[in-house]
Image (tube, rainbow, N blue to C red):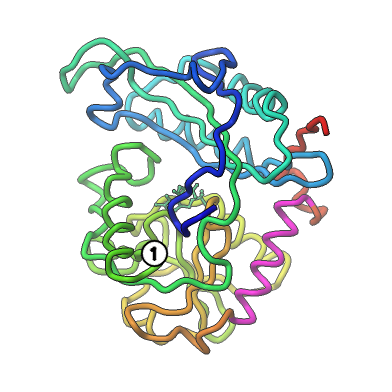
């Protein structure tokens, strides 16, 4: 990938799953009148698959799909397929494209053609797209700035749902960070506490303990966040505390890192011009990165069930 944080595919895939069947990339089109394009009435997921010895190992596929159906429920959307069908579509699509690199899987459901009004509940279109995907953010550490944009209060728009519309906020924050010379943005919640990155959850390390904002702090309840909390406690024997984090704690912590499907575990080395810890990847972060990597490849027996192996032809 050329530029950190842009997620530009190196090449387009051959096939896409759209509304029930696998079609060629050129034919994977939707109409300009679809409701989702105008009003952001869609839900989606981001899932990683790791290429390992003629298998694509898909990480927590079911958990991501389950979250997509939960997101849909929150916005009154019925996805017109059972969850098992989208899981099967994902597996078939990996095989059809014969991927031999790491991939990023993006299921998406959005309101299609029908009414133009705000209360229109148009039929839902569904797609699964998969691209070849390397690192999203620099694994050697990123420089961050606090965004001037805040995560909304819980009574303004659901942040627990991974909806397309709310990603305008992440887009603005990420561009602002980039224009200011940072790699990624950190957003505060409506009360001024640390919430999360533009597309990642955040953790700080203090005295070898992990601290991360609680789910009520305007964050997406990340699956990588859950993975890291579990691995830290169960495999590494670390203490993990979910509590509000003040902005200045970001400047004074020992280590900090992002978690996310795209970002995986990304060290944070600078925030608002203050060096985090030693300014290089900390020891706790390093051990979390390694353990996370092992888990995604199915190399930790207790968490093998997180990995769905899809055999791809050489
Ligand atoms: N918070 C936000 C705002 C996110 O967009 C994401 C994921 C996360 C947290 C982490 O969630 P999870 O661990 O479940 O992935 N962001 C997407 C991703 O695929 C999209 C990024 C462009 O990582």
Q: Total of numbered circles in the picture?
A: 1
- Residue beneath disc 1: 184
**Residue pushed farthest top?**
114
Q: Circle 1: is it few (<14), some (14-19), or many (20+) Cα within 10 Å?
A: many
- Residue 92: percent from left, percent from top: 68, 23
Q: Is residue 86 above or below residue 207?
A: above
Q: Is residue 271 above or below residue 124?
A: below
**Residue pushed farthest left?**
117
Residue at point 28%, 27% (across, down): 37
- Out of 49 and 175, give the one closest to the viewer: 175
Q: Quadrant of residue 238?
A: bottom right
Q: Is residue 27 above or below residue 180?
A: above
- Residue 174: percent from left, percent from top: 33, 58
Residue at point 82%, 39% (across, down): 54
Residue at point 42%, 25% (across, down): 109
- Residue 269: percent from left, percent from top: 48, 78
Residue at point 78%, 32% (across, down): 312
Quadrant (top left, top right, bottom left, bottom right) of the C terminus? top right
- Out of 118 and 24, give the one closest to the viewer: 24
Q: Quadrant of residue 75?
A: top left
Give the left or right position of residue 276, taking residue 91 as reference: left
- Residue 131: percent from left, percent from top: 57, 38
- Out of 147 and 182, give the one closest to the viewer: 182
Disc 1, SS: strand
Q: Is mark 1 within 8 Å of ligand 1?
A: no
Give the left or right position of residue 239, taking residue 187 as reference: right
The span picked out in magenta is 282-298
Give the left or right position of residue 236, taking residue 179 as reference: right
Asked whether 228 falls inside the magenta stretch, the response is no
**Residue pushed farthest bottom?**
278
Q: Main secondary structure of the magenta part?
A: helix
């Amino acid at each position: 990938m050329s530029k950190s944080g842009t997620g530009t595919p190196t090449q387009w895939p051959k096939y896409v799953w759209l509304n029930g069947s696998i079609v060629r990339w050129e034919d994977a089109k939707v109409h300009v009148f679809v409701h989702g394009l105008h009003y952001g009435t869609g839900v989606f997921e981001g899932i990683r698959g790791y290429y390992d010895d003629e298998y694509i190992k898909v990480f927590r596929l079911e958990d991501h799909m389950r979250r997509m159906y939960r997101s849909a429920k929150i916005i009154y959307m019925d996805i017109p397929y059972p969850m098992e069908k989208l899981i099967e579509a994902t597996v078939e699509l990996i095989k059809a494209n014969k991927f031999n690199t790491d991939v990023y899987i993006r299921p998406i459901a959005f309101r299609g053609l029908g009414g133009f009004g705000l209360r229109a509940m148009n039929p839902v279109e569904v797609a699964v797209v998969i691209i070849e995907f390397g690192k999203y953010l620099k694994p050697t550490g990123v420089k961050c700035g606090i965004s001037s944009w805040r995560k909304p209060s819980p009574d303004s728009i659901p942040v627990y749902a991974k909806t397309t519309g709310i990603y305008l906020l992440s887009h603005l924050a990420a561009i602002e960070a980039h224009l200011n010379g940072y790699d990624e943005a950190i957003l505060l919640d409506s009360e001024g506490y640390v919430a999360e990155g533009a597309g990642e959850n955040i953790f700080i390390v203090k005295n070898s303990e992990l601290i991360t904002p609680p789910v009520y702090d305007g964050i997406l309840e990340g699956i990588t966040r859950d993975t890291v909390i579990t691995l830290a406690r169960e495999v590494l024997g670390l203490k993990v505390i979910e509590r509000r984090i003040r902005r200045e704690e970001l400047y004074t912590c020992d280590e900090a890192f992002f978690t996310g499907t795209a970002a995986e575990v990304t060290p944070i080395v600078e925030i608002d011009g203050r060096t985090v810890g030693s300014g290089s990847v900390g020891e706790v972060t390093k051990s979390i990165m390694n353990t996370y990597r092992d888990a995604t490849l199915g190399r930790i027996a207790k968490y093998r069930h997180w990995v769905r192996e899809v055999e791809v032809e050489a």
